[in-house]
Image (cartoon, helix red, strand yellow):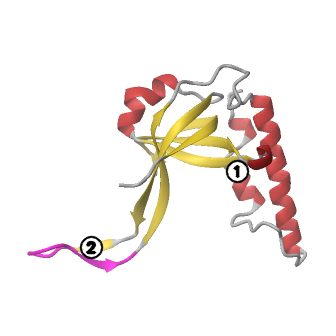
Amino acid sequence: MTTGLDLQGFIWSVKPEMKDTDETGRVVVQFINFGYEEKALPFILVVSKANNEKWFDDNFKAGSSVELKIQPTYVSVGAKKQKVAYGEDVKTSDGYDVLELLVSGAYEIIEDEENEFFYDSKRVKEAMKERKVLLEQIEADGKKGKKPAVKAKVSAQEATDAFDEDETPF
């Protein structure tokens, strides 16, 4: 059993998860948490089909401030097994594991503007713009041969593509 965590923040978008051209029944939530010095920390969360049908879809929409219960899990990708007549199947290739953050529960939507975890859309958009500028600066410094103070594993464009301002409903 793994340990869960609570994340407070802002639901940027909610979209159905797609595999090729078909919906899987799960939902992908683009979620913005705020860390040290109010820096935007985007997360991609997943809501299982069962949880989406039971409570998520009816209660949580883009533009909501909320505290979510998160269950980190690892999903194996590319592992192949060979069937055997007796005993456990044998792995023929290892593949790799991907961390998936599953939404396992939630508290009520935070609507009180006096609550420290209430985030209005203007504040969130500003924080995401600041994040984009910071990532672009880190990328530019890297191209100049400077060692960045913070290592970026993805480019500024890749990091912000998932959080496109034009797709938000607010």
CA gap between label 1 and label 2 equals 35 Å
Residue for point 80% across, 42% down = 127
| Place of residue 101 in the rendered image (x, y in percent of width and height, measured from the top left) | 50, 50
Q: Looking at the picture, tell me which residue is in the foreground, 68 or 83.
A: 68
The region drawn magenta spans 83-94
Q: Quadrant of residue 33?
A: top right
Please tell me whether the stretch drawn in magenta is mainly helix, strand or loop.
loop
Q: Residues within 10 Å of mark 1 (few under 14, many from 20)?
A: few
| Place of residue 77 in the rendered image (x, y in percent of width and height, measured from the top left) | 41, 66
Q: Residues within 10 Å of mark 2 (few under 14, many from 20)?
A: few
- Identify the amino acid type marked 2: Lys
The residue at which mark 2 appears reads as: 81
- Furthest toward the left, the residue is 86
Q: Secondary structure at mark 2?
A: strand
Q: Quadrant of the C terminus?
A: top right
- Identify the amino acid type marked 1: Asp
Q: Is residue 82 left or right of residue 158?
A: left
Q: Quadrant of residue 63?
A: top right
Residue 161 numbered tag: 1
Q: Secondary structure at mark 1?
A: helix
Q: Looking at the picture, tell me which residue is in the foreground, 69 or 60.
A: 69
